[in-house]
Image (tube, helix red, strand yellow):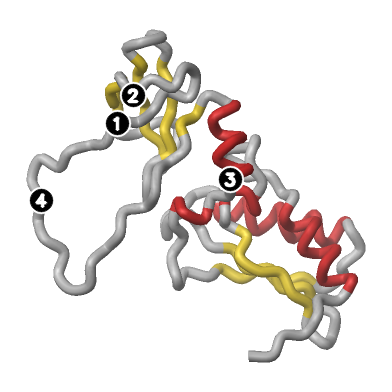
Amino acid sequence: MVTTPALPDEQRARRIAAEVPDPELPMLTLADLGVLREVRTTPDGTVVASLTPTYSGCPAMAEMRADVAARLHAAGFAQVEIRTVLDPPWSTDRISPEGRRKLREHGIAPPGRAPRKAAGPVPLVLGATRQAVPCPRCGSTDTEQTSRFSATACRSLWRCHACLEPFEHVKEL
């Protein structure tokens, strides 16, 4: 496969789109979160930005699309197209090391590795065990989940028994 070098406008557009904050986790950019998949320019100068939602029903997707388009327009790009890419689906493995660091700094436990899905039928597992989630404040794994859902569907609530602090955890997807 032959790749062509990125044009200066394409590089600038990528940098601008990459700096857009996530509306639900504003300490992260869309690039940190791995939602920004690609930014390219077409021969007619249109900037095409591709976003992958964290899940197909993500209520923040419309705002993400609007924010990326608005920032690119404000930077002088007249023609902007925002595409939603669902395949391959987003995974928590797409969160950058910088994004994971920012989550911890803001008291949110970053996810572990996304579960690997075997080919073929998915077996039914009753009473699935949960792995320990380290406390983002003190690092203890003596933690318990207090609610499967938090402010958003992709986060859960936990409590640390060592430092007694509550915290959120980004679920592995």
Q: Earlier in the sequence, mark 2 or mark 3?
A: 3
Amino acid beneath label 1: Ala
Q: Are marks 2 and 3 in contact (CB under 8 Å)?
A: no
Numbered label attached to residue 97: 3
Q: Which structural element holds mark 3? A: helix
Q: Which structural element holds mark 2? A: loop
Give the labeled residue for mark 1.
Answer: 132
> Where residue 89 appears, x then y in whole percent?
43, 65
Tell me the CA gap for discs 4 and 2: 24 Å
Q: Are marks 2 and 1 in contact (CB under 8 Å)?
A: yes
Q: Earlier in the sequence, mark 1 or mark 3?
A: 3
Tell me the CA gap for discs 3 and 4: 31 Å
Q: Earlier in the sequence, mark 1 or mark 4?
A: 4
Numbered label attached to residue 141: 2
Q: Earlier in the sequence, mark 2 or mark 1?
A: 1
> Where residue 24 appears, x then y in whole percent?
56, 39
Count of numbered circles in the view: 4
Give the labeled residue for mark 4.
Answer: 125
